[in-house]
Image: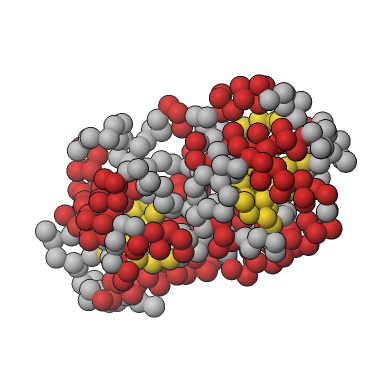
């Protein structure tokens, strides 16, 4: 194993951000891209490493990979694809180990379970001085082997095991029995996307200006429990016949959700919009943003809804209670309860003044507590702090 290097003060810190897939929209993949492209280029030499590239078939619908490549190029960030096509495959990780040694990488910052396990092992074997593992949600009920790997592999090899919510950090400690001093909670942050001037999404979609409209943004994965949202919408429609539901995103669950929508008689109410580059315009068309997830980390989609001044109806899971105080910025319900979700949506539709006030408070909170610059600054400071603990002199 190579000993950690002691470089001259003033040398840029070499950082590799590791994630499974390339995307500028999907949760953890998006944040890995954001971190890699927003590190201060005067102080950090950044590389984004994607283990599964080209993307697997189920992910090919996410055309945002081309946007992600453009963002990497614009930011001067290197792209390292490992071309992993299946789980048990050694060659991609050997490719990463060679890169880490050849480039004398100082920090490896991995994201999500698979990359956390493989990345922490490979980075330590390659002699990388600082290793960070970043979990974006906690969903290991019924999967004890994952908890074992988190405790015995990831938390031992990584200098810090980062959680995106206080609840996830508590579960790392109380359920997985990770040592508390190895864990760290870092709130996520965003830079709001600008709306396109003059676009009226309602008019483009043929939605009347007075029709109550709710929506959700995100990949159509099982964890998002969008079937619960559709069932809740069917209940709300009995009270609000003109209700419109906008579903922005794509993924492996889309076909079954479209079938369920038809079964519930929502053909004229539910709009499956696919992946969109005009999300801020879509948000402007909504009265309420909804999240029906069965588990979550800290979803960026809700932060974008808060920035848009929307009240939020969401399930009380993961980091959502860190973002939304029920009754202040929106309403929270238990996961899996379509009736409760529908009742919360109905309550806000019946009291638009209260809903607008919740949206205003949510926007204020997003801007004060969940800012991208603050998040990036925390990671830059953490990289430097841990490197200096290992004798690496870093210019400040």
Quarter residue 273 falls in? top right
Compared to residue 134, the image places residue 8 above or below, namely below
Q: Residue at x 32, y 69 (%)?
A: 180
Return the x and y of residue 89 as percentages of the image width and height: 22, 35
Left or right: where does residue 150 sit relative to residue 320? Answer: left
Tell me: 216 left or right of 212.
Answer: left
Task: Give the tally of numbered discs.
Answer: 0
What is the quadrant of the N terminus in the image? bottom left
Residue 281 placement (x, y as % from top left): 73, 45
Q: Residue 195: x percent and y percent?
A: 72, 49
* Closest to the observer, 172 or 378: 172
Coloring scheme used: secondary structure
Q: Is residue 27 above or below residue 1?
A: above
Horizontal relation, residue 275 to residue 124: left or right: right
Q: Is residue 59 visible?
A: yes
Picture layout, residue 361 above or below residue 56: below
Query: What is the x, y in percent for residue 192?
Result: 63, 56
- Res 161 quadrant in image: bottom left
Of the 4 image quadrants, the one containing the C terminus is bottom left
Residue furthest toward the left?
A: 1
Q: Is residue 76 visible?
A: no
Q: Residue at x 57, y 60 (%)?
A: 321
- Asked whether 99 or 247 is in front, the reply is 247
Front residue of 125/287: it is 287
Q: Residue at x 26, y 76 (%)?
A: 389
Front in this rendered view, residue 160 or 354: 354
Residue plotted at (54% across, 35% down): 220
């Amino acid at each position: 194993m190579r000993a950690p290097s002691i470089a001259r003060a003033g040398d840029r810190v070499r950082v590799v951000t590791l994630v499974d897939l390339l995307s500028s929209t999907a949760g953890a993949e998006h944040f890995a891209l954001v971190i890699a492209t927003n590190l201060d280029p005067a102080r950090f030499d950044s590389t984004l490493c994607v283990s599964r590239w080209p993307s697997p078939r189920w992910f090919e619908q996410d055309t945002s990979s081309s946007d992600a490549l453009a963002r990497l190029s614009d930011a001067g960030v290197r792209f390292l694809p490992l071309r992993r096509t299946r789980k048990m495959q050694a060659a991609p990780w050997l490719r990463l180990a060679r890169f880490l040694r050849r480039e004398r990488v100082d920090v490896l910052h991995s994201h999500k379970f698979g990359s956390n396990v493989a990345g922490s092992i490979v980075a330590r074997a390659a002699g990388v001085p600082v290793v960070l593992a970043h979990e974006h949600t906690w969903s290991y009920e019924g999967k004890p082997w994952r908890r074992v790997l988190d405790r015995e592999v990831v938390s031992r090899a990584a200098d810090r095991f980062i959680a995106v919510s206080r609840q996830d950090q508590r579960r790392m400690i109380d359920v997985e029995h990770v040592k508390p001093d190895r864990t760290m909670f870092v709130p996520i942050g965003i830079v709001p996307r600008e709306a396109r001037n003059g676009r009226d999404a309602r008019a483009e979609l043929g939605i009347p200006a007075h029709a109550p409209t709710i929506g959700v943004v995100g990949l159509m994965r099982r964890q998002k429990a969008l079937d619960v949202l559709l069932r809740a919408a069917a209940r709300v429609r009995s009270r609000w016949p003109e209700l419109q539901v906008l579903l922005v995103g794509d993924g492996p669950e889309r076909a079954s959700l479209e079938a369920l929508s038809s079964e519930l008689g929502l053909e004229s109410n539910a709009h499956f919009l696919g992946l969109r580059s005009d999300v801020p315009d879509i948000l402007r068309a909504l009265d309420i943003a909804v999240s029906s997830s069965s588990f979550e980390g800290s979803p960026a989609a809700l932060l974008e809804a808060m920035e848009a001044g929307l009240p939020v109806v969401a399930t009380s899971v993961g980091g959502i209670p860190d973002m939304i105080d029920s009754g202040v910025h929106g309403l929270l319900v238990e996961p899996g309860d379509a009736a409760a979700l529908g009742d919360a949506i109905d309550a806000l539709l019946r009291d638009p003044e209260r809903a607008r006030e919740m949206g205003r408070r949510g926007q204020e909170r997003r801007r004060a507590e969940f800012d991208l610059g603050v998040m990036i600054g925390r990671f830059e400071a953490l990289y430097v702090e841990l490197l200096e603990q290992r004798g690496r002199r870093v210019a400040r």
